[in-house]
Image: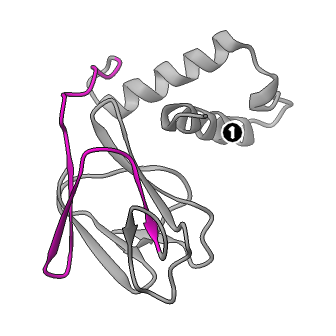
Amino acid sequence: MTTLLERLAQTAYEAHRAALPGYVPPWEDISRQERQAWQAAVSAVAGQAGGTLQEPPHGKSLVIEIGAERRTFGADFTVGREGSLVIDDGFASGQHARFQTVRGLWYVEDLDSTNGTLLNGRRIYSAQLLKKRDKIQIGHTVMTVASA
């Protein structure tokens, strides 16, 4: 199973590859050492401290508010008409979005849903770091990050 950090590294590499005028091999063709370097770079950027991310603090939870309801998650989960957090929204896909924690930080990513996932009013195309007061919209359902 591919981790979120690996997917973030691959996304960064593919953006780098697309920006260069010459041939750059696809992610699948680069060496293990190059992949690890990209993962270290993504980890450093996500940590915003100039170094790699520290191990997550134990028990770091994500608290989401949907209307008056408040839900707390301590592990990765999916949202949609099916999944860990079920929403009754005809514009949501069955498995619409995934929330994952990587080294103590929470991310949201769209699971190739039909109508997309919005973060603070903007459609997301890759995993996005969450912070307190972020608004995630799935279909017509809006969730607010109470703590991350």
How many numbered circles does the render carry?
1
Residue 79: x and y in percent read 43, 66
Q: Position of residue 64 (x, y in %)?
A: 22, 63
Nearest the camera: 123 or 148? Answer: 148
Task: Name the residue: 52% across, 23% down.
Answer: 39
Which residue occupies the foreground of this view, 123 or 22?
123
Q: Secondary structure at mark 1?
A: helix
Q: Would you place residue 117 above or below residue 90 in this image? A: above
Question: Which residue appears at 80% of the width and 32% of the height?
Answer: 26
Question: Taking 114 as reference, is 97 left or right?
Answer: left
Comparing 44 with 7, the one in front is: 7
- Give the residues drawn in magenta, as a range: 52-80
Which residue in the structure is indicated by mark 1? 14
- Is-magenta flag for residue 1? no
Name the side, left or right, on which 85 lies relative to 19: left
- Residue that appears at 35% across and 82% down: 141
Taking the view exactly as shown, the residue that stands out farthest to the top is 33
Q: Quadrant of residue 142?
A: bottom left
Q: Amino acid at mark 1?
A: Glu
- Above or below residue 105? Residue 39 is above
| Residue 54 in magenta stretch | yes
Residue 12 placement, left or right of 17: left
In this rendering, is residue 131 above or below 42? below
Quarter of the image that includes the N terminus: top right
- Residue nearer the viewer, 15 or 30: 30
x and y percent of residue 114 in the render? 63, 76
